[in-house]
Amino acid sequence: MLRIRPVHLQSCWRSTLARTYSVVSPKYPPTIEILGEYHPTDEVTNITPAIISKIPLRLHKHPAHPLCTLRSLIESHYPDFSSITPPSPLVTPFKNFDELSFPKDHPGRTVTDSYYINKDLMLRTHTSAHEVEVFRDQQTKWLLTADVYRRDEIDGSHYPVFHQMEGARLFDANLSGMKEVEEDSERLEQRLLRSNIIIQDIPHISPTNPVQPEHDPVYAEAMTRNLKLSLNSLILKLFGAQQQQEPLRVRWIEAYFPFTSPSFEVEVFFGGKWLELLGCGVVVQSTLDASGVQNKIGWAFGLGLERIAMVLYSIPDIRLFWSADPRFMSQFKPGEITPFKTYSKYPSCFKDVSFWTAHGTELHENDFCDLVRDVAGDLVEDVKRIDRFVHPKTQRTSLCYRINYRSMDRSLSNEEANVVQQQVISRLQNDFGVEIR
Ligand code: PHE
């Protein structure tokens, strides 16, 4: 998510142009309760009850859940790392962005891309939001797993809540620290050399992916090598067993994150496609300074658990992770990765809605999707914009959306879908002043 390049771990940032048109005006009570605490709302509040209802679920803590098994598998690869689960997804924008050197105008900060409770409190958009706090706690080898929240479109691979795992390791920035890195790298390299893996690498450091001015280039090289070896071994552990005859193919790509340099993304070739797995890099000095950590250098990575679990378990739709249908959870045992057996889907029901937006306004797609999700919850499978035009005389915008309603655990009647659709229409009229066509 957190970079300016077009692809990211979950989806693309939309254009700045689209963002500037958002109109967010649903009526909120003066306070909202989240995890038993009340928080004031204000003019930026955009969190919805549908999102709030996901916060206590913590899928990554349910032993048989695929996300939990994957988490344990990754933790077993780093046996001497501490395992952290932050208690709440509420963070300040300072912690989510500023403390990690995000520029003031970064698109991730906008209300169309992130969920705000009020201007001083938001739902974390990535697990990196906890880096400073964990480093401050003097942790030098850690893995942190948490639910993260981003406003997004609705379809089979995008869901506004997903799970990330952040890992980091710090070494002493001196000769004995470097000896420790080299020994660890040597051990990892020897193991990888004996494995059936092809790694498409790029230089550790380059003019476009520079060493930080505060760092000794030799140390930065050693860090990057260790980071790459550590992640290549993790990827081999996760995907190697499934690959059988063919060698596992991994490729490294230059990336940009405000809180690492040099920075990378890693992709794995699986099922005939390159799959983006994670972002990583050498931790920026200002993060360690903010944490009060001195004379250390280290790396961090952040990976999306759903992406990987969907591939390892052959789970075709990201919404299934949230399914209450016993046919989903009964398939899984703690600690075992077994292919998901599809069960028949219940029939879907398409409903269209066309409307003129209120005079002089646009309606951001994320505002539309959140409204639908708020009314319909997980009954909505897919939302597509099928038409948009601006009337040449009045300059008003007309939009048409097609909503695909489908329950994951029962048959939805057309009457029931109509009731939900009617609620969507009323909310569109009340919250956004649209005129139904
Ligand atoms: N937080 C980044 C994201 O969500 C991933 C990342 C983590 C990148 C740690 C570098 C270091 O996209």
Image (spheres, rainbow, N blue to C red):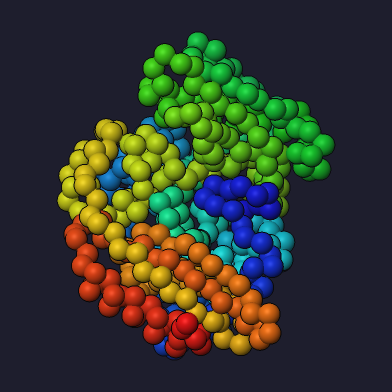
79 horizontally vs 10: left or right: left
Q: Measuring 32% from the left and 50% from the top, which residue is drawn there? A: 321
Residue 170 image offset from top left, x and y in percent? 59, 38
242 horizontally vs 282: left or right: left
Farthest residue toward the front? 393
Q: Is residue 50 visible?
A: no
| Residue 434 or residue 279, whichever sits in front | 434
Residue 301: quadrant of the picture:
top right
Residue 278, above or below 184: below
| Residue 272 or residue 116, whichever sits in front | 272
Residue 419, above or below 313: below
Residue 173: quadrant of the picture:
top right
Q: Measuring 20% from the left and 40% from the top, which residue is drawn there? A: 331
410 horizontally vs 102: left or right: left
| Residue 221 or residue 280, whichever sits in front | 280
Q: Is residue 279 visible?
A: yes
222 horizontally vs 127: left or right: right
Residue 77 image offset from top left, x and y in percent? 42, 30
| Residue 3 or residue 142, whichever sits in front | 3
How many marks overall? 0
Q: Measuring 76% from the left and 28% from the top, which residue is drawn there? A: 218
Residue 132 image offset from top left, x and y in percent? 58, 54
Q: Measuring 38% from the left and 78% from the top, which residue is drawn there? A: 424
Residue 227 image offset from top left, x and y in percent? 60, 32
